[in-house]
Image: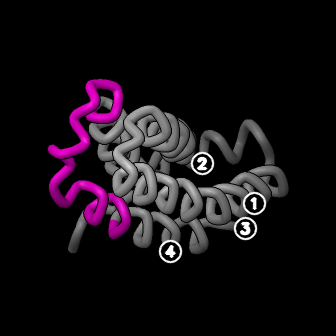
Amino acid sequence: MTMPEIDVTTFEELKRISGADFINELVDTFLDDAPKLIAELRSALVGRDADSFRRAAHSLKSNSATFGAQRLAELSRELELLGRQNRLGETGDRLGELERSFQVVAEELKGLQA
């Protein structure tokens, strides 16, 4: 069995602090925003726009960490760093890996919603 993408302890603590209704809104917003940020990453990569790439990766990193999606946050952090250093040519398959991680995170978050 693979490790879950979401740190349930982090998620449950957020839920406890913010309440079930609010966390459901947060999850819905994240599930809506993350694909847009991933599309921005792809577009910025194609356009070699390191600053837009960095900003999108930073937003995705912060949003992922909020829910305890540690792997997604770490991949986003790596991409943010490459954008900051204007090293977009070194992204390799990190963006594909990030997209796959997001798909798993999205399913887990839907399952955790009250």
Alpha carbon distance from label 1 to label 2: 12 Å
Which residue position is annotated with label 1? 24
Which residue position is annotated with label 2? 12
Could you tell which of marks 1 and 4 lies nearer the N-terminus?
1
Determine whether label 1 and label 3 are within 8 Å by CB.
yes
Amino acid tagged 2: Glu
Which residue position is annotated with label 4? 107
Give the residue at the far front of this rendering: 47
SS of the residue at dot 1?
Answer: helix
Residue depicted at 33% across the width and 58% down the height: 98
Could you tell which of marks 3 and 4 lies nearer the N-terminus?
4
Mark 4 surroundings within 10 Å by alpha-carbon count, few (fewer than 14), some (14 through 19), many (20 or more): few
User: Which of the pair 66/63 is nearer the observer?
Assistant: 63
Q: Is residue 92 above or below residue 89?
A: below
Could you tell which of marks 3 and 2 lies nearer the N-terminus?
2
In the rendered view, does 15 fall on the left or right side of 108?
A: right
Could you tell which of marks 1 and 3 lies nearer the N-terminus?
1
Q: Which residues are magenta?
A: 82-100
SS of the residue at dot 3?
Answer: loop
Amino acid tagged 3: Ala
Q: Quadrant of residue 76?
A: top left
